[in-house]
Image (cartoon, rainbow, N blue to C red):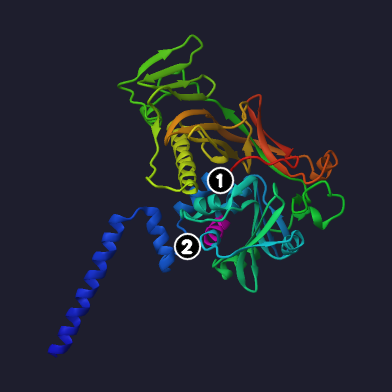
């Protein structure tokens, strides 16, 4: 009996030591590090909903398609958001467990598209290490490839990633440890076919071979757009100023003749226009500090900077009572820092602002030194049919064209239009 009590006491002490170790780990590790540890220990192989939602806000695909038992389904309009929320967890799983990456031929890539799969297409070539970080929170990936189209499929009951970089014409296959059963169930639940790939039918040689094409009429929502009038009293709140790191007690306020409101605090200037435009600029030793650790590698730094920029822009939009949905459209290195451009997603497409992008952010020496952005609110007002792709294709010149849906503002309405990428790709280094 005494020996049993002794063994029980030893067991309890061991459990207490393990509990104390886990508490110490939780206190000493950041959330990203904890997530990585959980995945590697097999404690949490499914990304949580917060992480998945965050990934969607950092970068949204221009197209999203699923091939199921009935054929290829290409999401359109507001259906894009619903499908993205459904398939994002399997993408997180696949990107977070990537193993060996090998080169494949174009014909092999196209042949794989005949099998059940989930395909994500981006407007620009996105470095693979950024895709991995934005969907998993992990860093340290050394791959140099980029992707304009990323496909989840299975080979011998194992989930793999096939992806291509249309700017270089290179194709790759990556091993993953994503769940096969989950992948199969997602493909089997795909809606009825409404599309096909350009290589699968005659008459679409002007498009890139793996361009998905709608086979039925497509309708996208239209929206009424409202621009905030920042000259009205109470529109510029303390929370909105705080999002730009401006202290409303210390800032000097000026109202210009055209109605623009300008706040000056130290080296920082913040200008609000009547038409929803906001400009933040810095002279001298000012700027919004970014939360970056010392000793970060260049890829890791770029991933974290872009992630924080999206968080800040979303926080500004919420504080202004306006729509968010910012998605990174480009990153370039300039002046010991970066210039990051962002678009806003709307109804399954992206908004084309009068100034081009919805936001342009300048970072120098780990500080935000410039922000130019447009804020607005939208409400759905109706639907509009897109120009059929068969007719649009007849207007194209050259080869390797790709289509995208973008919204433009016309007389207070956001109207969806079909645009051709023209085989040109820009965006991220």
Q: Quadrant of residue 380?
A: top right
Q: Is residue 142 above or below residue 258?
A: below
Q: Is residue 15 above or below residue 39?
A: below
Q: Check disc 2 and report the residue beneath it.
A: 46
Residue 127 as seen in the image, left or right of residue 165: left
Q: Secondary structure at mark 1?
A: loop
Q: Is residue 92 magenta?
A: yes
Residue that extends furthest to the bottom in the rendered view of this protein:
1
Residue 397: say if magenta.
no
Marks 2 and 1, Cα distance to the nearest angstrom?
20 Å
In which quadrant is the N terminus drawn? Answer: bottom left
Q: Position of residue 117 (x, y in %)?
A: 66, 62
Quick check: 211 above or below 104? above
Q: Locate residue 119, reporting x and y percent.
A: 66, 56
Identify the residue position indicated by label 1 in the image: 59
Secondary structure under the numbered disc 2 in the rendered image: loop
Q: Quadrant of the C terminus?
A: top right
Residue in the image at 80% along x and 55% along y = 199
Residue 420 location in percent, x, y?
Answer: 74, 39
- Segment colored magenta: 86-93
């Amino acid at each position: 009996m005494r020996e049993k009590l002794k063994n029980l006491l030893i067991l309890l002490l061991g459990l207490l030591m393990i509990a104390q170790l886990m508490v110490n780990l939780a206190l000493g590790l950041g959330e990203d590090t904890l997530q990585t540890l959980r995945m590697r220990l097999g404690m949490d192989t499914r990304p949580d909903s917060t992480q998945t939602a965050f990934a969607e806000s950092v970068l949204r695909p221009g197209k999203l398609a699923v091939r199921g038992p009935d054929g290829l389904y290409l999401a359109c309009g507001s259906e894009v958001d619903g499908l993205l929320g459904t398939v994002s967890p399997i993408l997180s799983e696949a990107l977070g467990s990537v193993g060996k990456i090998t080169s494949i031929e174009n014909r092999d890539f196209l042949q794989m598209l005949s099998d059940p799969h989930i395909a994500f297409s981006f407007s620009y070539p996105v470095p693979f290490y950024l895709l991995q970080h934005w969907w998993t929170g992990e860093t340290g990936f050394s791959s140099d490839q980029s992707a304009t189209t990323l496909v989840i499929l299975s080979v011998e009951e194992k989930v793999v990633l096939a992806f291509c970089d249309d700017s270089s014409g290179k194709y790759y296959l990556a091993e993953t440890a994503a769940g096969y059963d989950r992948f199969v169930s997602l493909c089997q639940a795909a809606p009825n076919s409404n599309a096909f790939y350009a290589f699968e039918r005659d008459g679409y040689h002007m498009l890139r071979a793996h361009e998905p094409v709608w086979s039925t009429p497509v309708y996208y929502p239209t929206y009424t757009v409202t621009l905030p009038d920042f000259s009205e009293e109470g529109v510029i709140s303390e929370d909105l100023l705080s999002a730009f790191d401006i202290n409303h007690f210390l800032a000097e306020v000026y109202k210009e003749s055209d109605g623009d409101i300008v706040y000056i605090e130290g080296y920082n200037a913040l200008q609000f226009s009547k038409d929803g435009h906001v400009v933040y600029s810095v002279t001298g030793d000012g700027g919004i500090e970014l939360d970056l650790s010392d000793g970060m590698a260049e890829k890791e730094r770029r991933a974290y900077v872009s992630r924080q920029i999206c968080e800040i822009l979303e926080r500004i939009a919420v504080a202004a009572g306006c729509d968010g949905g910012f998605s990174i459209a480009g990153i370039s290195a300039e002046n010991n820092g970066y210039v990051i451009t962002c678009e806003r997603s709307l109804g399954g497409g992206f908004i084309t602002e009068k100034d081009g992008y919805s936001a342009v952010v300048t970072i120098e020496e780990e500080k935000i030194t410039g922000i130019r952005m447009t804020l607005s609110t939208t409400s759905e007002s109706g639907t509009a049919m897109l120009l059929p792709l068969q007719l649009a294709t007849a207007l194209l010149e050259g080869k390797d064209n790709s289509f995208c849906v973008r919204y433009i503002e016309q007389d207070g309405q956001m109207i969806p239009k079909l645009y051709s990428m023209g085989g040109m790709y820009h965006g991220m280094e």
